[in-house]
Amino acid sequence: MELEEAIQTLKDFAKYGRYYSNNTEHHMKTAINTVLNELDVLKFKYQARKDRTDTIIKKQEKMIELMSKHIRADDIDEDICQYQGICNEYECEECIKQYFEKKEGK
């Protein structure tokens, strides 16, 4: 049974109830299994896409961390920490991260 047919069968059953003539027990079970199989496929695709997205985000976070360490090592961070106004240090990776997050958000 095709997915569209299965969905229509279930819609008809919801609308007309058990008295709808084409909805035999076997027909209903087939429709339900078709829809459940499609849900499993969609769930797998969603999880794969989510995993790829999570991997990209982790790589970006690592890149930001490395850039912050590099900026701090080059002593460029003094102005950034003063600009952020959240600490009194001059070698603060958190200030550097927040500075660029704010810049990116604009």
Image (tube, rainbow, N blue to C red):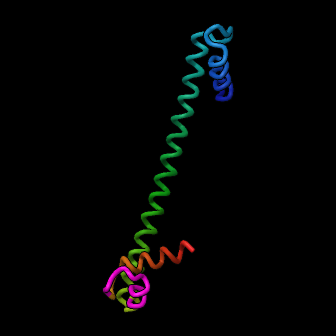
Give the image location of residue 29, x and y in percent: 55, 17
Tally of marks: 0
Task: Give the answer, above or below, for where 86 lies relative to 12.
Answer: below
Name the residue at the front extreme.
85
At x 67%, y 10%, the residue is 20
Give the image location of residue 76, x and y in percent: 41, 91
Q: Is residue 42 left or right of residue 81?
A: right
Task: Give the answer, above or below, for where 23 lies relative to 78.
Answer: above
Q: Quadrant of the N terminus?
A: top right
Which contiguous range is marked in magenta? 78-89
Q: Is residue 37 left or right of residue 70?
A: right
Q: Is residue 103 left or right of residue 71?
A: right
At x 53%, y 74%, the residue is 104
Task: Pick whichever, 99 or 63, lies toward us.
Answer: 99
Give the image location of residue 99, x and y in percent: 45, 79
Q: Quadrant of residue 96?
A: bottom left
At x 66%, y 14%, the residue is 16
Q: Quadrant of residue 91?
A: bottom left
Residue 88 in magenta? yes
Q: Quadrant of the C terminus?
A: bottom right
